[in-house]
Amino acid sequence: MIKIIGLDPGMSKTGWAIIRLEEKNNIKFLGGGTISTDGKLGVGERLHIIFEQLKKVIFLYSPNEAAVEKIFINKNPKSSLTLGYARAIAILILRMTDLPMNEYDANYIKKSITGNGHADKGQIIFMVKQIVKSSNIKCHHTADALATAICHAYTKNFCFMGIGS
């Protein structure tokens, strides 16, 4: 049984989602959430919160693989740099827990989930709810992380080869 953690890293909010591939073309949403950090805290403290919370999620769900949304270059260089810090922490904890990891561009994730590489947040939320047959996904950070995990399953052809069963 394959479990995948999808991550949508961010300094203020890091989305995470866990899926399990149960049988051919059946993806079960096991859990998801958003790790929030207070902007009043220092960078080191915020990164430590992200690290510790992701570590708890990984140990709770024991995923086999990981998928992380790649960084996009923002118009504001400081925002891009800050996002890079959060991604680095996410990648570090995945490496420390020996999880195989793949990275995906946001447009690739959107296209694999909705068929449109420029889909908006509402379309992503709608489609991931349809795919995992759950209405418990309310936050777009969680939905983005879930989309990343589903994209990984599709890209690796897990859903089409019956590997999840």
Image (cartoon, rainbow, N blue to C red):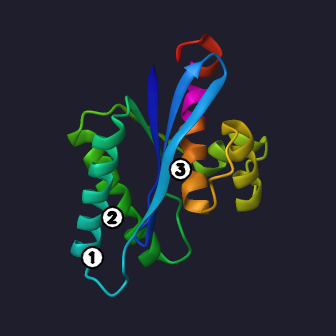
Query: Looking at the image, which residue is at 57% across and 46% down?
Result: 146
Q: Which of marks 2 and 3 precedes in the sequence? A: 2
Amino acid type, label 1: Val
Which quadrant of the view contains residue 28? top right
Asked if the residue at tag 1 contacts the one at tag 2, i.e. Cβ–Cβ closer than 8 Å, the answer is yes
Amino acid type, label 3: Ala
**From what the image shows, is residue 15 above or below residue 41?**
above
- Residue on which disc 1 sits: 43
Helix, strand or loop status at disc 3: helix
**Majority secondary structure of the magenta segment?**
helix
> How many marks do you count on the picture?
3
- Residue on which disc 2 sits: 85
Q: Which residues are magenta?
A: 151-158
- Label of residue 145 in the image: 3
**From what the image shows, is residue 78 above or below residue 97?**
below
Q: Is 93 on the left-hand or right-hand side of 122?
A: left
Which quadrant of the view contains residue 14? bottom left
